[in-house]
């Protein structure tokens, strides 16, 4: 180590610290960046540490990221490939069946089922943003994603993820009107309002995705970055960035709080009113009939927000990036896969429409 020291700059003896500009093999890269490593030695304790800095030139030239995924063990790759491929196929088929059933059956051309078909489209987009990349990476043994590709993936991930959240809120409002104001339901939930709610949901989701993408696009990286995840996860990118990310973190959590907090508040308000209205129903059968129309939606809400909240709380406790990646599979892959089964198994109208669709194609 001492033979590698260059350009020694001593400070006063009262500091008892020796700062050295050095070249260390660990920081000898061939990626075109100029690295400077400042080493300091605390003389009484003989401890040393390196603080690396990069020349400001070419900081924005980092064009590739390496997605580390789940495991580097070659023996586990076939299992991971089969697992993700099967989940993706099931997700696609399940959600496509929901869309076909709703579009082909005139009895299901009601606001609740129209919103359900749009939710299935969002689930397909949400899963397709990440899973095909994982399958391709395992098959080609190439986990590299470009900087532009990372931003595009991030943009669509937030777009469809936020669209899921807002649509669940719209569906909660639909159930609120149907149970609390049944006589005015056809007037309130008219086709014009339904189209407006779908358009507003998409615009809100687009705004969220572009704001999140803008935050990440401002980050700079010292060299090609290894992301310990199976997709471009913004919190991981914030950790790996060279510049000060305190403002970015505040802005990102503020935006996340708004675009996640408002839908959750809307769902809680809707179900508070629904529960208050149901409790006023005198008969037990009437209460069960009213609540049965909300069962599937409540199950999907609990699955979506439960898995997302679990990943967030788990990441704050475990501090393990690999464990966060495994937990993220629950809300990024498993939840969109289970949604069609929840609605089809608990809903007679969907069952009948699927049966008619299958009989028609047989």
Image (cartoon, grey):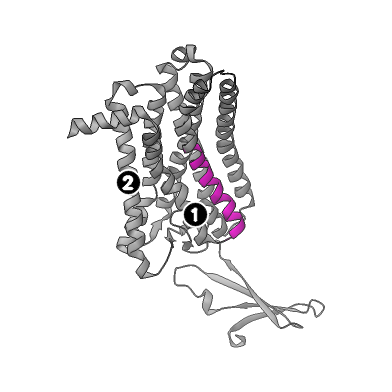
Q: Nearer the viewer, residue 247 or 272?
A: 272
From this view, report whether residue 247 is shown above or below residue 178.
below
Rendered-image quadrant of the N terminus: bottom right
Q: Which mark is residue 90?
A: 2
Q: Which residue is drawn at 61% across and 83% down?
A: 5
Q: Nearer the viewer, residue 334 or 158?
A: 334
From this view, report whether residue 221 is shown above or below residue 359.
below
Q: In this view, does 279 lie to the left or right of 195?
A: right
Q: Which mark is residue 343?
A: none
What is the x, y in percent for residue 25? 52, 79
Label 1 sits on a secondary structure element that is helix
Q: Can residue 203 be seen in this view?
A: no
Q: Residue at x 53, y 44 (%)?
A: 306
Q: What stretch is highlighted in magenta?
A: 300-319
For label 1, the residue is 327
Q: From this viewpoint, which residue is outermost toward the front?
A: 284
Q: Distance between the residues labelled 2 and 1?
A: 20 Å
Q: In this view, does 91 lie to the left or right of 297?
A: left
Q: Which residue is drawn at 28% across and 32% down?
A: 354
Q: Nearer the viewer, residue 108 or 328?
A: 108
What is the x, y in percent for residue 240? 54, 60
From this view, report whether residue 27 is shown above or below residue 161.
below
Local packing at callout 1 (Cα closer than 10 Å; few below 14, some 14-19, many 20+) is some
């Amino acid at each position: 180590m001492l033979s590698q020291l260059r350009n020694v700059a001593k400070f006063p003896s009262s500091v008892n610290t020796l700062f050295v500009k050095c070249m260390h093999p660990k920081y000898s890269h061939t990626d075109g960046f100029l690295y400077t490593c400042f080493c300091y030695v605390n003389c009484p304790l003989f401890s040393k540490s390196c603080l690396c800095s990069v020349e400001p030139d070419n900081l924005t030239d980092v064009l590739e990221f390496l997605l580390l995924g789940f495991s580097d063990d070659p023996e586990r790759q076939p299992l991971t490939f089969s697992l993700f491929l099967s989940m993706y196929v099931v997700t696609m088929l399940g959600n496509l069946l929901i869309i076909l059933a709703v579009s082909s059956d005139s009895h299901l051309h009601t606001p609740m089922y129209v919103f359900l078909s749009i939710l299935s489209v969002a689930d397909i987009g949400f899963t397709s943003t990440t899973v095909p990349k994982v399958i391709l990476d395992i098959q080609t043994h190439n986990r590299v994603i470009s900087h532009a590709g990372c931003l595009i993936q991030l943009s669509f991930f937030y777009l469809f993820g936020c669209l899921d959240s807002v649509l669940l809120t719209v569906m909660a409002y639909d159930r609120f009107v149907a149970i609390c104001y049944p006589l005015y339901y056809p007037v309130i939930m008219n086709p014009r309002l339904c189209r407006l709610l779908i358009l507003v949901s998409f615009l809100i989701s687009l705004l969220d995705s572009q704001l999140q993408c803008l935050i990440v696009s401002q980050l700079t990286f010292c060299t090609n970055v290894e992301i310990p995840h199976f997709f471009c996860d913004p919190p991981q990118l914030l950790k790996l960035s060279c510049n000060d990310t305190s403002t970015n973190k505040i802005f990102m959590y503020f935006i996340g709080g708004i675009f996640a907090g408002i839908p959750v508040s809307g769902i809680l308000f809707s179900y508070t009113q629904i529960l208050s209205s149901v409790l006023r129903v005198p008969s037990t059968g009437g209460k069960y009939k009213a609540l049965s129309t909300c069962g599937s939606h409540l199950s999907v809400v609990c699955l979506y927000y439960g898995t997302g909240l679990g990943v967030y709380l788990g990441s704050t406790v475990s501090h393990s990036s690999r464990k966060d990646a495994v937990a993220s599979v629950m809300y990024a892959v498993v939840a969109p896969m289970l949604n069609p089964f929840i609605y089809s198994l608990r809903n007679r109208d969907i069952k009948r429409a699927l049966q008619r669709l299958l009989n028609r194609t047989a």
